[in-house]
Amino acid sequence: MSARLGRAFFGRSATEVAPDLLGRTLVRISPTGAHLRVRIVETEAYEPDDPASHAYRGVTDRTAVMFGPPGHLYVYFVYGVHWCANVVTGVPEDGSAVLLRAGEPIEGTEEMACNRGGRVPLAVGPGRLAQALAISGADNGLDLTTTGTSWFEGAAGIRPDDIAMGPRIGVREASGLPRRFWERGNAFVSGPRKVTGSGAPEKP
């Protein structure tokens, strides 16, 4: 097992951390003691100046975690149905985070399937990823850099040539900003694969 990523890794801008998380592993130790591992294959960056960010209008009870130290989980409920997991980035009072959009399951898939009620795919999309790993509002503010039951690991991410970048999904404000990152050719990526720049869709 490789060492967990420390606070310095997350203490950078969201647009630096988001692509650097690709290829790294999010680990959760479940109440049963099982290790649930997903390899992150898709992320979205939300910076302080971003009108699509929850933190754009300042600190609220909901967003307070985003203005704290980097390396903590920011978990929120969306559409009255799904929890979504983000990791706080930057420096305290910055208000930036990276949304974890999709992961490739690599360990503990039976328990992930149970968490998902037998539905597939397991972790394709932010709501499914959180559900597969049993991430909920109770995990909001969880420190991923200490000795807790959740962390990121991986000595290195993926090669820059294997990273695609394009517009984020499901945002109204600043919808054209190329702040969504994914691993090219990975079947577990959740959304459209239209690459900013060329305008050509990536082949799965």
Image (cartoon, rainbow, N blue to C red):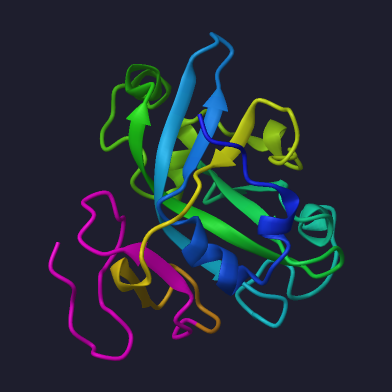
Q: Which one is in front, 97 or 19?
A: 19
Where are the magenta residues, as a range?
Answer: 175-204
Magenta stretch: dominant secondary structure: loop
What x and y, as percent, mark residue 120?
26, 33
The C terminus is located in which quarter? bottom left
Q: How many marks?
A: 0
Q: In this view, does 163 lie to the left or right of 173?
A: left
Outermost residue on the left side: it is 203
Q: Which one is in front, 159 or 117?
A: 159
Classify residue 194 by image quadrant: bottom left
Outermost residue on the bottom side: it is 197
- Examine the rendering and report whether any part of residue 169 can be seen: no
Q: Which one is in front, 203 or 135?
A: 203
Q: Is residue 51 magenta?
A: no
What x and y, as percent, mark residue 41?
37, 53
Identify the residue at image location x=74%, y=68%: 55
- Examine the rendering and report whether any part of residue 107 can be seen: yes
Identify the residue at image location x=47%, y=81%: 175
- 177 is higher (above) or lower (below) than 156: below
- 204 is higher (above) or lower (below) than 81: below
Classify residue 98 by image quadrant: bottom right
Q: Which one is in front, 40 or 5?
A: 5
Identify the residue at image location x=25%, y=70%: 193
- 152 is higher (above) or lower (below) than 134: below
Q: Is residue 200 magenta?
A: yes
Classify residue 145 by image quadrant: top right
